[in-house]
Amino acid sequence: MKRFLVVASILVCLVFVAAAQRPIRDLKPTVILISLDGFRWDYIDKYKPPALRRLARNGVQAKWMIPSFPTKTFPNHYTVVTGLYPQNHGIVENNVYDFGEVFTMSKRSEVQNPRWWLGEPIWVTAEKQGQRSASYFWVGSEAAIDGQSPTQWRLYNGRVPNTMRVDKVLSYLDQPVATRPTMITLYFSHTDDVGHEFGPDAEETGYAVLEVDDLISRLMAGLRRRGIDQKANVIITADHGMANYYPKQVTYLDDYFDFDDTERILWTNEIVQIFPKAGRTDAIYAKIKELAHTTCWKKGEIPARFHYNEGRRIAPIVCSSEIGWITSNRKRWEEWYRDLDDVNRPRGAHGYDNRYQEMQATFIAHGAAFKRGYVAEPFANVEVYNIMCRILGLKPAKNDGDLSRVKGMLR
């Protein structure tokens, strides 16, 4: 009897699993957009993650994808889903000054406030045109942009286990066709977190690449069990690459001008936004226009290739560090430096000029809409939005991309 009960229990479990993962035979054109934060363009060859290499080999891989300037997390994630350069979608850096307030990634009340988010992200485009969307984390998805949120979404919490994120996305696909989302976003921060601490060439970063590869393998296995691994369109992107920098390679702006001449300065190590007091812009700029390892521009004179001169949120003076260097002030730098465990080893950074090869991002795409074994020439990340709209049969909102530049990757 005991043996019979064990066998019966096993059979019940098998029936339950089979029922929970029935083949999906009514899948509409579907996009699963995945961000591997900080996943540099060459990590595929450098660390040889097997699942990602297999998708690239059997689908589309860009030689690299060009991030928008500045090569920071929030601006580029929002560019990917809107097709707009940061000057046009308003998230001009991880820190933004407007409305007399400073928007930062950690200020939840502002991250969730629609006033910051210009343009139309892909989930809003989908919802407006009668399709359902879901977001398991993506920059901008917590705000009701133009009064619209994804049908399913949750507040960002970096402690949510990555495997749970994958399983929840798969569960979206198990819904009946009437409620099943066709546009899904998914985000992982792991390669960026480890890359910042140890740099892009570190053994630790290689392990992080393999860990996120396991997540992609888990996702694809889940799609395969549902019979849709060749049908669902999986797009794997990154917001930027990663470069080594050295803590002692620093330019101190307070060595060159008086901060009392400014209303506000927004600091990151790689890009600095300076808001001078009235009438002080030219005087400040004259003192910093020829620094050795930091390039500063006045708004309106920033190189056109950056698409970063328009919009009220661009600072009157913008400074960009040379790759491998940081720009700071002595007090800020010293407070940070004294807590470092080893001041001589490199760390990882991004936010630099997007012409640097180290800043280039990964793009891999696989599924029914994409060619097999296709290598795409480098393209700007403003093009991804139009690709997704074409796959989903959506009319794109106004954007800075041009589908003709990338349509060769589509079947």
Image (tube, rainbow, N blue to C red):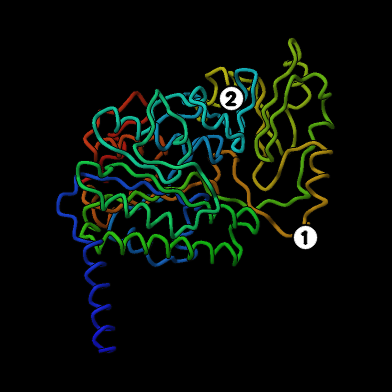
Task: Report the quarter where the N terminus lies.
Answer: bottom left
Among numbered discs 1 and 2, the one appearing first in the sequence:
2
- Residue 103 image point, x, y percent: 60, 29
Horizontal placement of 182 versus 245: left or right?
left
Task: Give residue 25's position: percent from left, percent from top.
Answer: 15, 54
Taking depth in this image into account, of 61 and 222 the one nearest to the observer is 222
> In the picture, residue 58 is in which quadrant?
bottom left
Q: Which mark is residue 302?
A: 2
* Residue type marked 2: Ile
Q: Residue furthest top?
A: 279
Name the residue at 70% across, 21% down.
Answer: 275
Observer-nearest of 155 and 207: 155
Can residue 357 be seen by looking at this rendering? no
Instruction: Give the amino acid type for the residue marked by disc 1 in the picture.
Output: Asp
* Mark 2: few/some/many CA within 10 Å (<14, 14-19, 20+): some
How far apart in space, not on screen, are marks 1 and 2 (Cα)?
Answer: 36 Å
Residue with the mark numbered 1: 342
Q: Is residue 379 left or right of residue 182?
A: right
* Residue 16 or residue 120, whichever sits in front: 16
- Pick the residue in front: 103 or 58: 103
